[in-house]
Structure formats: C-alpha cells, structure tokens
Image: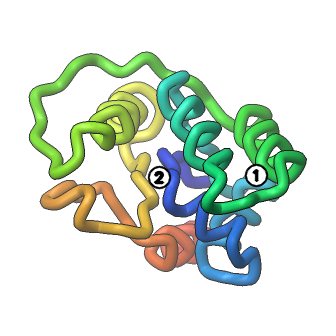
Amino acid sequence: MLFAVIDTNILVSALLKFDSIPGLVVEQIFRGKITPVLHDDIVDEYRGVLSREKFAFNPYSVNALINRLLYRGIFVEPAEVDIYLPDAKDEIFYTTALTARECIDNDAQIITGNMKHFPNVSFAVTPREALNLLLQRG
C-alpha cells in the first residue's frame, strides 16, 4: 500500500481520460492500493476545481470520485512549515504529505502531474513513478 497526497491535476486528468496513467492511479485508490492522505482544504480544492465550468465534468462523477477518496482516505492536520513553493496553494499538499511521512508512513508521497509545482521535494512523484512504487512493493 502507498499513502499519498493526490494533487488535483491527477484527478482532473483522470476524469478527462480514465484510461490514462492518472486514471490508473485513481483506479489503484479505488482498489485500496493507494490510500489518499487528505485535509479539508485539499478536499475543498478538489470540489472547487472539478466543478469548474470549463471542465464540464458530470457532477455525479465528481461527487462519486470525491466520495470514494473520502471513503478510502485518511485525514491529517498538518503542522505549519516554512517552505517556498512556486504556488502558495500547493503548500497544503506539501505540509499534509510531510505530516503523513511523520505520523503514518515515512514513505508517503505527493503524486503530481506537474513536478514544477514541487521543486526539490524528494517525496513528490509523477503518476508513473507512483505506479512503479506500487509494483516494487508487490
């Protein structure tokens, strides 16, 4: 099992094309192989972004996805950390993953489709890298 904070861009990509690498990541969440690490602010971002008119996602699909993440996920309350990221909105993803590494599993990851969001973060991985980590663990 892999504990991971799922960047919103993974969910967007999976909803746009479920038979993609991000879609496979979401499938592994559904199968219980990846446990999402969550915080209320992250869930709020998921809801806000996935409900944007420009994506035109089916509201039922969005709710079903978020409900599955909530069902499979673990919530943590991250400590404040002094970190600079290119987008301050990504700090909650970083601090949540850091807390998960300290409190749940020291190998918890951030899964992101855009590594530029998390420069120099050793525990940020692409969707493909996350799937490879699962394969390595058996």
Identify the element where label 1 is drawn.
loop
Determine the residue positioned at 62% across, 49% down.
Answer: 52
Q: How many marks?
A: 2
Provide residue 138's location: percent of width, then percent of height: 64, 71
Which marked residue is nearer to the observer: mark 2 or mark 1?
2
Provide residue 28's location: percent of width, then percent of height: 71, 63
Determine the residue positioned at 67% across, 45% down.
Answer: 51
Is residue 137 depicted above or below 42 in this figure? below
Q: Which is more toward the observer, 85 or 24?
A: 85
Tag 1 or tag 2, which sits nearer the N-term? 2
Toward the right, the furthest residue is 60
Identify the element where label 2 is drawn.
loop
Relative to 61, is 9 on the left or the right? Answer: left
Relative to 76, is 71 on the left or the right? Answer: right
User: What amino acid does circle 2 point to?
Assistant: Asp
Provide residue 129's location: percent of width, then percent of height: 44, 75
Per the image, the residue denoted by label 2 is 7
Is residue 20 depicted above or below 89 in this figure? below
Q: Which is more toward the observer, 136 or 17?
A: 17
Per the image, the residue denoted by label 1 is 32
Within 10 angstroms of label 1, few (less than 14), some, or many (20 or more) residues?
Answer: some
User: What amino acid does circle 1 point to?
Assistant: Gly
